[in-house]
Image: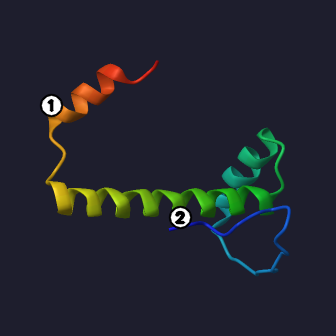
Amino acid sequence: MVIPWDPITMSDEKLVLSFPPELVEHIRADADAHGQSLSEWLADAASRKLRHAAALEALHAFEAEHGEITEDELAEVRSQWPR
């Protein structure tokens, strides 16, 4: 799955969204802390969620074809992963 979002070439579509006030406070604080607008923060969060879903889909497809990844295989990969 490719996430078709490019902030430079894509035009924006305006949306009206509702969030609980407490969530908005946290979103606004994090966006401010990272120098982002609310729109940028929300677009980034949505894009990350879609990438995560695509990664899980790929993992499930891999495991369906090759079997479930074992704890030993995970430990081997972790031991080789740069820190």
Q: Residues within 10 Å of mark 2 (few under 14, many from 20)?
A: some
Residue at the spot x=21%, y=56% of the render? 63
Q: Compute the Cα span from label 1 to label 2.
A: 29 Å
Tell me the SS state at disc 2.
Answer: helix
Vertical relation: 70 (above or below) 68: above
Does residue 54 appear left or right of residue 49 in this picture?
left
The image shows residue 57 at horizontal and vertical percentages of: 36, 64
Does residue 41 appear left or right of residue 79 in this picture?
right
* Residue 20's disc number: none
Does residue 13 appear left or right of residue 55 in this picture?
right
Q: Give the label, 1 or 2, closer to the camera.
A: 1
Residue at the spot x=84%, y=55% of the render? 37
Which residue has dot 2 on it?
50
Residue at the spot x=85%, y=62% of the render? 8
The image shows residue 41 at horizontal and vertical percentages of: 73, 55
Residue at the spot x=46%, y=18% of the render? 83
Q: Amino acid at mark 1?
A: Asp
Which residue has dot 1 on it?
72
Question: Which residue is at the front of the view, 29 or 34?
Answer: 34
Residue 4 occupies which quadrant of the picture?
A: bottom right
Q: Which comes sooner in the sequence, label 1 or label 2?
A: 2
Q: Amino acid at mark 2?
A: Leu
